[in-house]
Image (cartoon, rainbow, N blue to C red):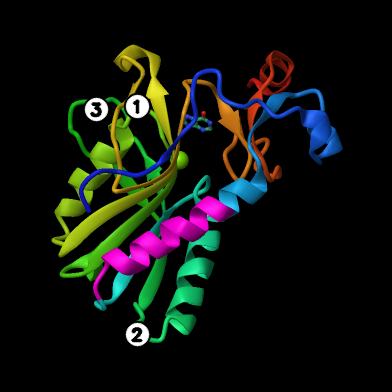
Amino acid sequence: MTATNAIEIGEDGQAFDLNCFCVPKHYETDLEYVLIPYGVIQDRIERLARDIFQEFGQEPLTALCVLKGGYKFFSDLMDKINQLNCNQGQKSIPVSLDFIRLKSYENDQSSGQIQILGGDNLSTLKGRNVLIVEDIIDTGRTMVKLLSTLERYEPKSVRVASLLVKRREDNDRKPGFLPEYAGFIVPDKFVVGYALDYNEYFRDLNHICVISEEGIKKYSQ
Ligand code: HPA
Ligand code: MG
């Protein structure tokens, strides 16, 4: 695959009125608006699954879910790939799943490496095609470190699927890193929902929303 296809949500993109959607009562005043409704997320993931299915060969794939934010995207993406595996007839891709968490090394910002917690022994990635599944790419620094750290385990190939990619104000409103598979390119605003959190809140919200000032105040640590 060459260029990344993604839905680009403009700076003044559609802001859906919260009153037109269902959101948990406990978050009613903590959100500004709905940026991406749950149904649109599902439709976009259906297409990402098709792109992945078509572009990968028949070789087994290891899908690596980056927790916690990536869990919903991962789960829905895997469901949709499984449906294609069952219903396409021509081919299917055997997929193994693994789950990791990332932790930056303290007092060491120059190593270019990141700590990978949980998951199987990473030496099982040797010779495998790996798909990293992330919720959001913001500065892109974490992803660059993760890719560099995974290289050590000699996978055959590594590709990245991220549901969201942020245009960064400090980068001429361009994304810091563009993955092979991107769901939506979004403005540089703090977004929550669909497993993306603010201090562990808002994962229990289905739509992707922009947090309000009140929400930031209420849930800041
Ligand atoms: N929301 C949630 N988590 C994040 C974000 C965001 O906008 N950017 C980086 N991590
Ligand atoms: Mg994340």
**Residue at numbered disc 1:** 139
The answer to which of marks 1 and 3 sits earlier in the sequence is 3
Q: Badge 1 local density, few (<14 within 10 Å), some, or many (20+)?
A: some
Q: As shown in the figure, which amino acid type bears the numbered disc 3?
A: Asp
Above-or-below relation of 171 to 43: above
Distance from label 1 to label 3 (Cα)?
18 Å
Label 1 SS:
loop
Magenta part of the chain: 43-57
Residue pointed to by mark 2:
90
Q: Residue at x 20, y 48 (%)?
A: 2
Is 26 placed left or right of 98 in the picture?
Answer: right
Residue at horizontal 72 percent and vertical 25 percent from the top: 31
The alpha-carbon separation of the residues under discs 2 and 3 comes to 49 Å
| Element under disc 3 | loop
Whether residue 70 is visible to the viewer of this picture, yes or no, is yes
The rendered magenta stretch, by its main secondary structure, is classed as helix
Image quadrant where one finds the N terminus = bottom left
User: Which residue is nearer to you in this view: 28 or 68?
Assistant: 28
Residues at marks 1 and 2, CA–CA distance in whole angstroms: 39 Å
Image location of residue 21, percent across then percent down: 79, 38
Mark 2 is surrounded, within 10 Å at the Cα level, by few (under 14), some (14 to 19) or many (20 or more) other residues, namely few
Q: Earlier in the sequence, mark 2 or mark 3?
A: 2
Between disc 1 and disc 2, whose residue precedes?
Answer: 2
